[in-house]
Image (cartoon, grey):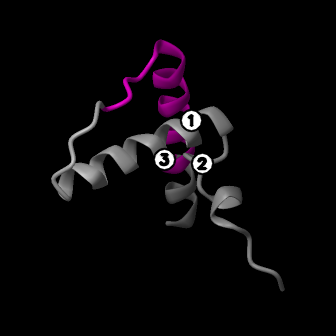
């Protein structure tokens, strides 16, 4: 049986726009740890809505596993 990729199983990564934003934000955070400070990307209203939807989907998935 073939395993699903992280993009297929992680609700935060399913939406391409939200995935791109979260990766860019993660890179900014990681570079700050190394001492290189860059401007963090800001959430737009649309991205905040998508993040809430992904969080709700993740919570639902966790509840189904219990």
The residue sitting at 57% across, 40% down in the picture is: 20
In this figure, which residue is indicated by the disc labeled 1?
A: 18
Q: Quadrant of the N terminus?
A: bottom right
In the rendered image, the residue lying farthest to the top is 45
Q: Secondary structure at mark 2?
A: loop
In this rendering, the answer to whether 63 lies above or below 50 is: below
Pointers 2 and 1 in contact (CB under 8 A)? Answer: yes
Of mark 3 and mark 1, the one earlier in the sequence is 1
Q: Residue at x 56, y 35 (%)?
A: 18
Q: Is residue 49 magenta?
A: yes
**What's the CA distance linking mark 3 and mark 1?**
9 Å
Label 2 to label 1, Cα distance in Å? 7 Å
Q: Nearer the viewer, mark 3 or mark 1?
A: 3
- Magenta span: predominant SS is helix
Kindly indicate the quadrant of the structure image that contains residue 25.
Answer: top left
As for residue 47 lying within the magenta part, the answer is yes
Q: What segment carries the magenta color?
A: 40-59
Left/right of residue 43 with respect to residue 65 in the rendered view? left
Q: Farthest residue in the left direction?
A: 35
Q: Looking at the image, do the residues carrying marks 3 and 2 touch, with CB atoms under 8 Å apart? A: no
The label on residue 13 is 2
Query: Whole-percent x and y of residue 12?
Result: 55, 46
Dot placed on the residue nearer the N-terminal end, 3 or 2: 2
Q: Which numbered disc, 3 or 2, marks the residue closer to the eye?
A: 3
Residue 58 drawn at (x, y percent): 52, 49
Circle 1 sits in a helix, a strand or a loop, which is it?
helix
Q: Please indicate whether residue 26 sits to the left or right of residue 54 in the image.
A: left
Mark 3 lies on residue: 23
User: Among all residues in the image, which is located at the extreme bottom?
Assistant: 1
Query: Which disc number belongs to residue 7?
Result: none
Q: Are marks 3 and 1 in contact (CB under 8 Å)?
A: no
Residue visible at 82% across and 81% down in the picture: 2
């Amino acid at each position: 049986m073939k395993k699903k990729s992280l993009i297929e199983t992680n609700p935060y990564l399913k939406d391409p726009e939200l995935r791109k934003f979260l990766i860019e934000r993660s890179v900014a955070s990681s570079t700050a740890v190394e001492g290189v400070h860059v401007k963090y990307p800001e959430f737009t209203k649309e991205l905040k809505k998508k993040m809430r939807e992904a969080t709700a989907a993740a919570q639902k998935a966790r509840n189904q596993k219990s």
